[in-house]
Every structure is written in structure tokens, then in C-alpha cells.
Amino acid sequence: MKGAYFVENRVCKSHKVLVGMEVHVQLSTQSKMFTGAANGFGGEPNTQVDEQVLGLPGVLPVMNKRAVEYAIMVGLALDCKIARHTKWDRKSYYYPDLPKNYQISQYDLPLCYEGAFELVRKDGSTLKIRIRRAHLEEDAGKLMHEAPGGYAIDFSIVDLNRAGTPLLEIVTEPDLSSPQDVALFGQELQKIVQFLGVSHGLMQMGHMRFEPNINVHITDQNGQVHKTAITEIKNLNSFSVLERATAYEVQRQIRQWEETGSLGRKSTYGWDEAKGSTFLQREKEEANDYRYFPDPDLPPVEVDDAWIAELKGQIGELPAARRKRYVDALGLSATDAAILASDRETGDFYEAAIAAGGDARRVSNLILSHGRRIANEKSVTLKEIGIAPARFAEVAGLIDQNKISVSSAGTIFDKLREKDGAAEQLAAELGLTQVSDTSAIDAAIDAMIAANPKPLQDYRGGKQSAMGALVGMVMKNGKGLNPKMVQEALKRKLGGE
Amino acid sequence: MAEQKITLDQVRHVAKLSRLALDESRLEKFSVQLGSILEYVAKISEVNVTGIEPMAQALPMHNVFREDIVEPSLPLEKVLQNAPDADGPFFKVPKIIGGEEDSAG
């Protein structure tokens, strides 16, 4: 039998994952990209549709200035170069969700290009993701193969509400090196667009759609490298699916090579959530099949320094810069800084509390524990909990001045959520104020010593454990004294005698 | 001078992209016609454009924007008025088999 046939032995000894991402972000303008019909997500089918959206003869598209600005803002946040001159191109193809038979997009002159984003992993390591381009285009309508409610139909139906809405397509270089990185990058992008306020970024609403382009460099048992063909997984809209689909596709490509020796062909895959696997959709159309050409209806866009400066001013400090400042200048831990800087509202709230006089770290602790607890309990955002940032500063001040204990803070915040009031006054009403007046403490200690010679003798006789009892007795007579200060004063007094 | 610049395969390809069902017998005719159109347009390549900035638009305008303000949409019956077929508030189209959900991207 030996030598009758020969099965080539292919073993993947090690592999390197290379993933580039295409991300489509629905911009949250009021109106569509080139016309005034509402960009209202959802809505009754085909009610946000005008002559432009239908592609009727004689219409003239006019650019939505805010959409262009939103796109530039994302470009700036991703450290992109902003094109000083750009134009619009028609991408021609036929599909029932595209009434004009072309999509207005940007082909060779994207609005933003050559950017970079630093991905910070959970373990603190970083990965630089180069951004190839970010361009503006209009979205297509929604094509459905089931009737609303999931009923089977033997035709397809089209809702054009989404057609013509502004869409930002962000394309990275293949710098993502694991399924976890891919999902993390998606989450970071979501934070950026939400921080900038250019998209609601709600995954379940399809505001962000991800298309990872995946290939693998396989090193075999002889040290030879085999590069699989790039496959693209279309339309993923959850971070969990993004990670699982990428992981599956990586393994599928390796398995295919091991089993057949094939490196595959450039193609498009879909994700089947029920089966937990990818499936082949089509081999990729070549770019020139779309017959791109400049849209003669739309004048070009010129971007000057003044406009960019104005938009930079609107953006303010980005989350990454804010996070770094919280660590470097305010002394917060990396974890706390990341949470506070993750969205604009939380960061602004925090900074308002500091501006009101609160100590940076004390206020951070109070917001992260009590502020977030109350927000979670009420299912609202931090800004909506009904307690002003200045109150956090006041409570922080009371703690720092030893007027209340750290553990009383929660009681005061619970009171504050019921009714607003000066923190110090509430602390007094609740009987939480500690007396930190040293003369009052000294007097109480003296009174205790005079009345209780026995425990004092025990302590002096070497029973250090009597200290707790002594403090307790001082506290009993002098209600509201700061126990920490009582203990310190007591030690000083007894030790000094 | 019917120098054929477009092959029959190219005509087939373009016809397919344009969703046109072309009879094989007409391929030759279109190949010649398209060839002569391209030849005519090719005259423009004789112009010396050294030192001239490329332009994508004939009008000397740029940044023609509108403010982000919502204007009324058409009523549903107008939207569907010219549709080949409708199903309730939707456009009704032949079943798209094996395609992805939406085309944009």
C-alpha cells in the first residue's frame, strides 16, 4: 500500500491574523445627505421620501453642510488628513433598494485620509490602527424578504426611508491582529462617534455596520508562509458577532488550507447567527464594475484652515486626551480615568464637580461609586440623576475636612436624590456631622479619663486592646465626634503622659 | 473607419451591468457603435493639458450647501404612485434570492 497514493501533509504551525475594517456609520443629521427629507430612523415605511430619494427626473442634489462637518470631525478625531479639495462620484449598480441606480459616494478623493487610532487593550498594551480613508456617501433603502412581523412572502419589499441618509464609511489598513482587537476597535469607534455627537451609534438600530476583511498568514511545518485570500464578512452589527464571526472566518481559512491546500478566492461572506458560521455570498465584483465617475450635479467641496479650526474647536478634547490628562495631571488610576473620560457627559460632569472645588480623586471616587450607583438604580445617565456636580464637590469637601466619614457619603447622596439641599446642612440634619474641633475632643477625653480610671489603668498596664473601649467611651459621651481624631488624640494624650 | 475598440465580451459585460438582455446578433452592431463613440470622444485626448489642474465639474462653483433642515416628504400615495407594484406601504419587487439584505457598502 505504501506509495500507492500520497496525501500532502499540511500543518499550520503558527498563523498571523490580518484584519482591515470597513465601518459604515449613520450620521445623526436632521435631514438627508442631499435633500431635505427627514433622516428620522424608523418611522412609518416610505414616509421620509421625496422626489430626490425616489430619483425622479429633474431633481438636483444639494449637500447637507452638517453631514460634511460631521464627517470632518470624525476624520479629525481619527487623526486623518482632511482633503482640501474633494468631489462626489456616482457608483452605478442596479438593486431594488437604490432607485437612482447609482449611489453618490466618494471614489478617489475621500474627505478624510491617512489617519491613525491607538487602540488600548484591556491589559494596557496598545496597537496602532492606520486609517486608510473616511468618506461620505448616501445610504440605500431597506430591502426585506419577510413581511413585518416575520411573515413569509413570495416577493421582496422595499422601504426607502433610509435611502439617501448620510453615511460615513471608514476604512482601516489591515492592522487588526485578533478577533478581540476587531471587536474592541468597533467599541472604541462607537465611543468616538457618540462623543462627537455625530451618530447615535446604537448597534441594535443599525447605526453602525461592520465589515471585517480577513486573511491569514499561515506558517507550515517547513517554515513556509501561505497567505490566504481576503474574505469580507458583510453587515455585522453587534460587537459580539463581530468577534465571533472574525474568529470563525480565521479558523475556516486555516481549516480550508489544511484540508484542501486551497488559499481560497477573494470573496464575500455573510454571517449565520443561528448556525454560528459564515457562508459564501459571492465572489467580489471588481471595483471598475461600478463605473465610478464624477457626479455632474454636485459642485466640489473645498475645505480651508478656518473651517477645520472651527470644527476642532467644536470637538474640544477627545476621550483619549482626556483620559491621559486625568491620569497625568489629576492622578486618577487608568481604570477610573477611562470610565470618566469614556463619554463626554460623564467627563463634563466630573470636571464640573472639580470646578466647584472638589478634590479630583475624592470627587472621582464619589461619582464612580454613588453617582453611577444612583444612575443605574434610576436607569438614567449621570447628568439626569438630579444631583448637581457641585453637590459632589460639597460632599468631597466635607470628607476632606473630616466633617463626615467616607461611609456617610452614601446616606447624604440618597437624601440628595429625594431633595436638593446644601450637603453640609443635610449632613447635620441626618446627624452625620462629625465634631472635629480638637478642643471639644480634648474635653470629651478628659471627661472620660476622669470618670473611668479602670480601663485607663488597663491600657497603661500594657493592654493595647483597651484602646477600642476607650474610644467607644469617649464617643458615647461626646456624640458625633470624629472617631479617627478621637483615637489619635487619645493616643497622643496617653502616650505623652 | 470602424476600428473596433470594444470587444464583444466587453459589450456583453456592459450589457449585463446595465441589466440589458442583448441578442447575440446585436452584439456586433453595438460593438461597432460603441467603438466609434469612444473614438469620437478620444479626440479630447489630443488636447495638450500640461499644467492644467484636473476638474470634475464644469461650473466654477464649490461648497454649495444647504442647512440641515427638514423639509416635507411626499405623501405615501405619491411615493408609490409610479411604483410597478406595491404591498401596503412598501414597494413590491420580485424576490431577491441569495442576495444580501441591502446593497449599500
Image (cartoon, rainbow, N blue to C red):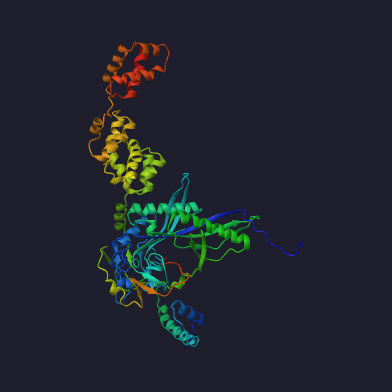
Foreground pick, A78 / A109: A78
Q: Give the image location of residue A18, x and y in percent.
A: 52, 56
Residue B49 higher or lower than A362, as above or below: below
Q: Give the image location of residue A268, x and y in percent.
A: 50, 65
Residue A405 higher or lower than A353, as above or below: above
Side (left or right) of A8 relative to A120: right
Foreground pick, A7 / A356: A7
**In this orientation, does residue A91 appear?**
no
| Rendered image quadrant of residue A64 | bottom left
Give the number of marks. 0
| Rendered image quadrant of residue A493 | top left
Residue A492 higher or lower than A105, as above or below: above
Q: Give the image location of residue A381, x and y in percent.
A: 32, 47
Q: Give the image location of residue A294, x and y in percent.
A: 37, 71
Foreground pick, B2 / A281: A281
Foreground pick, A95 / B76: B76
Picture residue at 46% right of the left edge, 63% below the top: A234
Q: Which quarter shows the C terminus of chain B?
A: bottom left
